[in-house]
Image (tube, rainbow, N blue to C red):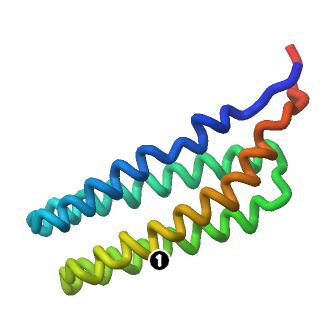
Amino acid sequence: MSQTVDTARLFDHSRFAELLNALLDLLDDQAPEAGIDAQLLCLQQHLQGQFAAEEEAMLATAFPATAAHKKHHDHALDKLAQRIAQWQQGHDRKVLQDYLENELAEWFVSHVNVRDFVTAQHLSLPRQDANPS
């Protein structure tokens, strides 16, 4: 029996876009810092979960570039954590907004178009189930 990974669901990044846009709206609307803090945490937690799911699927299908893809994820999460810490120290809306609109958004588009595209192609290949029924 063969199995495939539901790549459409796995690589559905609409939630990331929703969270990022909501965060940018909070910044544009001069929302209280606590609201921005909460939204940053939601974004961070979402990315951690999304990346973990992708990495689990890559490992399960023996994707050859798993380590490189994971390294890309880890770098993005580290950078986000640094920016969150920077935000919490100085609450500089302009710096945070610049990071979100430019660096994070550009990283995300590149990551989806290159890393996730190649990974999704690999994951969508039919596989032999290790435990056929």
Q: Is residue 43 left or right of residue 90?
A: right
**Which residue sits at x=31%, y=56%?**
21
Extreme top residue here? Answer: 133
Residue 102 placement (x, y as % from top left): 42, 74
Determine whether the residue tagged by mark 1 lies in a helix, strand or loop: helix
Residue nearest the observer in this picture, 15 or 67: 15
Q: Quadrant of residue 84?
A: bottom left
- Please, what is the three-letter code of the amino acid marked with disc 1? Lys
**Which residue sits at x=40%, y=60%?**
44
Q: Quadrant of residue 87?
A: bottom left
Q: Which residue is mark 1?
A: 79
Crowd band around label 1 with a 10 angstrom C-alpha radius: few (<14), some (14–19), many (20+): some
**Which residue sits at x=58%, y=35%?**
9
**Vertical placement of residue 45 versus 104, above or below:** above
Residue 34 placement (x, y as % from top left): 14, 64
Residue 85 placement (x, y as % from top left): 32, 79
Residue 15 placement (x, y as % from top left): 41, 45
**Vertical placement of residue 123 versus 86, above or below:** above
